[in-house]
Amino acid sequence: MKEYNNGLIRTNDKCIGCNKCVSTCPVVGANVSLVVNGHPTMAVSEDKCIHCGKCIRTCNKGAREFIDDTEEFFKAIYSDMKVSLIVDPAFYLIYGSEAGNILGYLREQGVYRIYDGGYGAEISAYLHATYIRNRKQDQNTATILNYCPAVIKYVEDHVPDMLDQIIPIQSPVMCTAIYVRKYLKDNSALAYLGPCPSKKDEMIDTGNVISYNVCIRNLMTKLKDVTFEECNHEDDLKAIGLGALSTLRGSFGYMIDRLIPKEMLSVKNEHIDRGFFDFIKASSSNGGYGASYYDLIACDVSCLMSAGVDIPFDKYSDLNRKIYDLRGKNLDSLNGYGTCDENYARVEKFFTEIDPDDFARSYQSTYRQMSQVPEDTCEAIFNSMYKDTETKRHVDCGSCGYNTCREMVEAIAYGYNRMENCIHYMNDELLMRYYTDDLTKIANVEGFKANVTRLYEQNPGKEYVIGVVSLNQLNLINDLYGFSLGDAYIKKAAEIAVRFTKDIGTAGRLAGGEFLICFENTPENMDAAYKATTYSFSDINVSFPLSFRAGLYLDRFRDETMEAMINYASLARDKIEEDGVSTILFYDNELQEKLAAEAMVTSQMYAAITKMEFVPYYQPQYSHKEQRIVGAEILCRWIKRDGSVISPGLFIPIFEKNGFIKTLDKYMWEQAFISAMNYQKDAFHRIPVSVNISRISLNEDDFTDTIRTLFKRYPIDPEYLHFEITESAYSSRQDIVSRKVNELREMGFKVAVDDFGSGYSSLNILKDMPIDILKLDMGFFRGRNSENGQIIIRNVVSMVKELSLDIISEGVETAEQAEFLRHVGCDIIQGYLYARPMPATEYEKLIRKEEEDMTSSRYENEMKEKGVFY
Amino acid sequence: MADRCFVTYEQSYNKKEALERVVERINEAAGGRVPILIVFFSSNVQFYYHSNKLHEIYPQSTIIGSSSYICLSSEGYGPDGLCALAVFDGIDCVAGVIPEVQAYPMQYASDVTEAAHRITKFENTVCLEFTTALLACEEIVLDTLNKGLEGTGIPVFGSSSGMGASSIMTYVSLNGQIYNEACVFVLIHNEMGCIKLIRENMYRPTIVSFMVTDVDCERRIIYEFDGRNAAQFLCEKLGIRKDRIRDYLAEHPFGCMVGDEIYNISVEDVDPDSGAVYCDSRVYNRTKIVLMEARPDIREVWRQTYELAMDSGNFKPAFTLIANCTIRTDYLIEHRLIDEFNDAMTDYYKCYVGTSGMGEQLCDRHLNQTMIMALFE
Ligand code: SF4
Ligand code: SF4
Ligand code: SF4
């Protein structure tokens, strides 16, 4: 960072970066906005600062200070150096009768001589008047009084074109110094006691005739504990005319006015303003504004308001009154009364001894032209401040301290200021942050909603689709490559979403790998959406293609809230299984009904357990050969108290999704154990039952423990209870599944593969899995080519037999199927052809009847054999 | 018919000999005509001599020149001697000087305007300028020239003057007057057709980009990138040690991103302690920078420039002026490509003359590590 705060005016650590000083500072770039250790501050750039001290008055935090030579001055007088003091008239005006006592004290401390600076003011006013009087009417000569050093520095540093406009005469203070040095032959070091920190610049520029700039404020702070004794102090040089008042604003010009013709117009009381010099320049090049001189000072009201004094505003008006009284009294002095010519002649006579050349001054340009900020740089800064319209570029509220937004933008380009100091930018930035997703920098949910609202307003006749899109494989990427690559995936996906909706809608990020999209419902757009299948992310080093699943909601009537639409789209998205290709599902009535049913099932399932609404139903399994029931599969039926039935086709998938299937499984297993226990006691019923184990329960770590606990509680003969595991459960984690199945078999239970043939069956199951029974689904019969199905069944049955497994055909619905199965050697059959699932009582009845029938037919046969006929 | 222009170069440590040969050849080519314009380049050492003598010999001609790192021309190249382009016909020119370029050149903008109004036509006119280097003043000179030319549509084309490795000062000259703090310019109106201005960037952007967040524009010092100490930021971003950063940046200029364009800015020095990066062109706060790297296919770059310049053979330049940055020249020398470069330039553009200075000026931009060309039909 460049070095700041190393000049006469400095910022201390009380600064809060409020920009107030920028607005009062006449120089762009003198105040530089910085962030130091996380705190905003406004530093002073010595390159640009003209030391006017205005900011010291402006800053109400006391964060601006000035440097003067008070300490060096005391060091010098205490080291017995011969130091004389020039006292600014302001000091006498402020301290009145006390002034003499203070100066007397200083003399006691070692000050050699004390001169009233008003004397030099009279010389300076006389020489300025001489210059003005002698100026030829048509000459374009200087018009600016050399009075305020900050004005001079401003011109030298910043307005070089005006340099020749400054009257080449020394200022009042310097005239005093030159007079005492040359005409009073005082060779001691000179100090100046006055109100102005910027006097130091004048001292340096004029060859250090004066060595110390002692500001009244610092002197009086240093002497705050001193009690000043009454003393008969007399200055070694005293002003005799209006010079005693020259510190008052306009008084120096007033002195000159008494010496030049009345018709010569002057402009007084102007302070440094960025535009005022342009005005003077323009008026002088246009043949002149007609002003004989310009009396300019940097301070707002007068030198008495300078940073080097400490007069509160309320005291200032009293002081002013006092000065005007004095001015009246002093009018009859040297330069106060008579016509201008009489006054001038009197003053001229008074100063006959002085050589005007001794009091001449020249000025040096220290200006360095600034380069113009290129338009494209301004454009870029405007845009990064969200000022992307002409209106926004002309807010010109001034809060940043500059008059216009353009000035602020240039200040930012030069490095003088920061965007954060524009209140409107900060507002927009906050809004932006509120509406923008941190990771992807696209809209967040709120931003998306706002954008959609705007889109709707701008396109009242259009129909839009709202979508919730989830990235597939995000978890996999996070697991495989870590979260940073996962984030890169999300960012890339955001780019794709933005690209897809560009010109047709808008996109945003919901959370994680979920995005929101909105686009116009047109055939082309829908076509583009459906064409999106997989995307390559090889540029972020993901080697496999990635896909999404999107739920869409078509907003036909604009009668839903944004939340509701997002919710519908989200529900549709939830219906899609994560897959390797991109899938889109629209939210529609059917889906709505499904979701309503799902909501109902979910809300009632726990109560249903306690109300024992889950009822075991038994579907018998018949043996062709034995012509009797050889087993039954226990199936779950949800029969509500009011008698209505909820289909397992509805509730099982929901339970599988929400995990309740585990609870239901345990419940049904217990029912199966109880049945087996009851039936094994009864000779009629000594037929095995089988019960299902869902894939989800099988995956539970405590699965076998649960069965073992039930087995302990219901110590049945395991021969009478079989477990059915669906074919799909074997497809994943085969080693774990087979371990668990083996544990069941070790307990003595038989295990059946359920639904073999309902999906894409793998014969590997027969090869690899430890099973006892194969339950053949009639899926092989379905489809276009049932002949092929028959061939497969025939072969599967023969294979199963060769593997010494039992085989049961389930889902048998027609006599032809039964006949075919019997023919190929599949003996046991389960299906509607023989019996539907039925309540326990019916099942028991059926068995009992079958037993009875069998008993009577056996009896009949025996009788027949014995020749007995009915 | 005698040619309207003539290029000559005499490589010689002996300034007298170099001048004599060059003058002899110009006179021969002139066939009794007085050159309207002579553009010349020479090393700092010989510059004063050539400037004075050329003016003495051709007092009626406009003679503009600049000290150069090396002189380039279709008649050869080298660090010493004198290289000159003399134009005898088909142009009108008005020249001028902008003094005080370091402090306040703008006060002379009206002189530029006056010069512009003395030229026959604004159309097909270019402002060729040479500005003394090492004063960090090119941007304000460009502001001044462009201000003076406002409303004329005349583009600025020029070079900061150059110098040999052991020199500490550069010079420009106009009609025998030598300056070490000035810009000399000549407005050249081509009566025979148009003037094409081309910029060749032999660097391409890398993926490393950042934003300037603290800068002293006037001194061309960057203190921070993306809110972090500039040198430290670069070291971390590039994965290199602090003591390597200077060398690295010498080969990787900054690319200043302006819309779709990238303008090169070279890094003069890096203070590893303070982290300040000293540039050869002004960089504004919030400028987006991309780190550049030399294109491996330099011959292809030259060919593409040629294609662009010649507009598939539809454009035929009578003579071409080039400004080829010193660092670029060094690159060509270090990679033993300088001979090939000069051959290619001669082959492509026939009658060409060029300087190698410490920056290039094109329209309103001061650039580094770039070659710019002005082709006169
Ligand atoms: S006025 Fe200036 S110095 Fe004072 S607190 Fe505000 S920014 Fe800081
Ligand atoms: S002293 Fe004056 S010029 Fe300096 S920063 Fe304060 S107001 Fe600006
Ligand atoms: S809108 Fe910002 S840049 Fe413009 S004037 Fe207000 S604060 Fe300054």
Image (cartoon, rainbow, N blue to C red):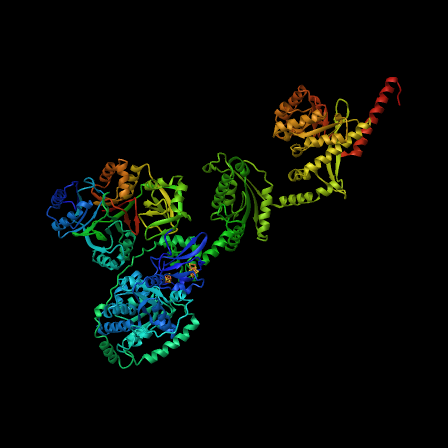
Say whether residue B196 is visible.
yes
Viewer-nearest residue: A189 or B8: A189
Q: Name above or below for residue A860 compared with residue A180.
A: above
Residue A169 in view in this figure: no
Percent of width and height locating residue A720: 76, 27
Residue B229 drawn at (x, y percent): 40, 47
Q: Is residue B291 left or right of residue A764?
A: left
Question: Which of the two residues, B269 or A783, is positioned nearer the viewer here?
Answer: B269
Q: Quadrant of ligand 2?
A: bottom left
Considering the image in quadrants, where does the C terminus of chain A appear? top right
Q: Nearer the viewer, residue B232 or B133?
A: B232
Where's residue B263, x and y in %? 33, 46
Q: Residue furthest top?
A: A866
**Image quadrant in which you'd find residue A629:** top right
Query: Seen in the image, is A42 located left or right of residue A268?
Result: right
Frontmost residue, B338 versus A202: A202
Q: Is residue A824 left or right of residue A396?
A: right
Indicate whether A380 appears above or below A797: below
* Image: B355 above or below A362: above
The percent coordinates of residue A319 (x first, y second) are 40, 74
Q: What is the tally of numbered marks visible in this picture?
A: 0
